Image (spheres, rainbow, N blue to C red):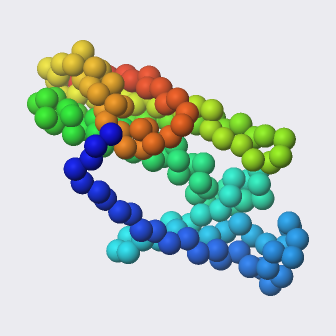
Amino acid sequence: MPHDKQHTYATRTEWTGNLGEGTTHYRAYSRDHVLSAAGRPDLPGSSDPAFRGDASRWNPEDLLVASLSSCHMLWYLHLCAQAKITVVAYRDEAQGTMLETADGGGRFAQAVLRPVATLAAGGDAARATALHEEAHCLCFIANSVNFPVSIEPTVIVAG
């Protein structure tokens, strides 16, 4: 697919979980790390608690699902603004399913986004619902993953 522009994203991941023994054995270290990028607040990371991680910190699997959800929302809001549809509230209860393999590896099998958009009184609910499909087709992150991402949208008209 041809492209007109290229964008580069630089992040830093720094492991902060050396408990004094390094990785001398599986239980000797914390999975804690810090994700950072210039000019932005740090993001505390770890692994999923199923893999000895800290449940109070973001894990890569959470971030992948959040990236899909955030990208979809940003495209959707853009398309609604272009279509003169006023969104006054938006939330998404996204969920991803990862399958772990016998060797300890794994992959995501699917993700489901469940966006709920509230439109200003008089909003075109049918058009607003249809724009979710367009947003999905344009989403950079959804276009980059190798598993299905489905959208189950709800549109509410205020008033």
- x then y, percent, for residue 71: 37, 44
From the viewer's perspective, is residue 101 above or below residue 83? Answer: below
Please indicate, yes or no, whether residue 57 appears anywhere in the rendered image.
yes
Classify residue 65 as left or right of residue 6: right
- Residue at image coords 45%, 47%: 67
- x then y, percent, for residue 157: 24, 22
- x then y, percent, for residue 155: 32, 22
Quadrant of the image containing the N terminus: top left
- Residue at image coords 59%, 54%: 60
Image quadrant where residue 89 sits = top left
- Outermost residue on the bottom side: it is 20
Please indicate, yes or no, whether residue 88 appears anywhere in the rendered image.
no
- Outermost residue on the top side: it is 126
- x then y, percent, for residue 25: 88, 71
Classify residue 55 as left or right of residue 116: right
- Outermost residue on the front side: it is 2
- Residue at image coords 11%, 30%: 84
Quadrant of the image containing the C terminus: top left
